[in-house]
Image (cartoon, rainbow, N blue to C red):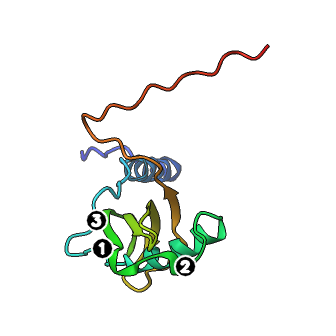
């Protein structure tokens, strides 16, 4: 006599496939997320120093930190890109260190931060941070006196 294998009911088979699909999906869904820490291979950040160099003096003037745009000796302006960090598809955060030399002999030192792409340097307006003092390694700052308590 031929021995028959037990037959699996239709509902049981459906449950089996549902559990198998859920297990496969959960391993995909709960996998570790991919972080965008490094820029994609072969892409280089665009050179966009002209954008913050041009816009920052207008912002300084609008906020009363520069009397006139003509006060700047543009031939002596110093620009150094400190960072260009990839944050998304063709989008970079760029940080620049800019020093404007004034015709009167003074300087204005700023740090800017803005987003740029290979298509457009002005993805947004730069944030401008005015540097009042640079403290280098080994410099000793004068001790500041705390004001006496008010009576």
Q: x, y percentage for residue 93?
A: 41, 65
Q: Secondary structure at mark 2?
A: helix
Separation of residues labelled 3 and 2 (CA atoms):
37 Å
Q: Earlier in the sequence, mark 1 or mark 3?
A: 3
User: Callout 1 environment at 10 Å: few (<14), some (14 to 19), or many (20+)?
Assistant: some
- Residue under label 1, please give it: 45
Q: Choose between 55 and 99: the one closer to the eye.
A: 99
Q: Secondary structure at mark 3?
A: loop
User: Callout 3 environment at 10 Å: few (<14), some (14 to 19), or many (20+)?
Assistant: some
- Residue under label 3, please give it: 39
Q: x, y percentage for residue 58?
A: 58, 75
Separation of residues labelled 1 and 3 (CA atoms):
9 Å
- Residue under label 2, please give it: 69
Quadrant in the rendering for residue 136: top left
In front of the other: label 2 or label 1?
A: 2
- Indicate whether 15 appears above or below 94: above
Picture quarter with the N terminus: top left
In percent of the image, x 24 and y 47: which residue is there? 2
Quadrant in the rendering for residue 125: bottom right
Q: Earlier in the sequence, mark 2 or mark 1?
A: 1
Separation of residues labelled 2 and 1 (CA atoms):
29 Å
**Horizontal side of residue 81 vs 41, given as left or right:** right
| Residue farthest bottom in this picture | 119
- Indicate whether 8 appears above or below 73: above
Q: Choose between 52 and 124: the one closer to the eye.
A: 52
Q: Secondary structure at mark 1?
A: loop
- Indicate whether 40 appears above or below 123: above
């Amino acid at each position: 006599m031929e021995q028959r294998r037990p037959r699996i009911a239709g509902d049981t088979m459906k449950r089996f496939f549902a559990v198998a699909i859920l297990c496969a999906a959960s391993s995909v869904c709960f996998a570790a997320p991919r972080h965008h820490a490094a820029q994609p291979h072969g892409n280089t950040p665009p050179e966009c120093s002209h954008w913050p160099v041009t816009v920052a003096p207008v912002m300084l003037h609008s906020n009363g930190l520069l009397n006139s745009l003509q006060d700047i000796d543009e031939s002596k302006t110093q620009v150094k890109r400190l960072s260009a960090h990839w944050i998304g598809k063709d989008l970079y955060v760029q940080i620049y260190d800019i020093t404007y030399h004034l015709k009167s002999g003074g300087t204005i030192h700023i740090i800017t931060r803005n987003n740029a792409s290979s298509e457009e340097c002005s993805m947004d307006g730069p944030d401008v941070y005015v540097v009042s003092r640079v403290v280098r390694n080994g410099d000793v700052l004068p001790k500041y006196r705390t004001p006496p308590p008010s009576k």
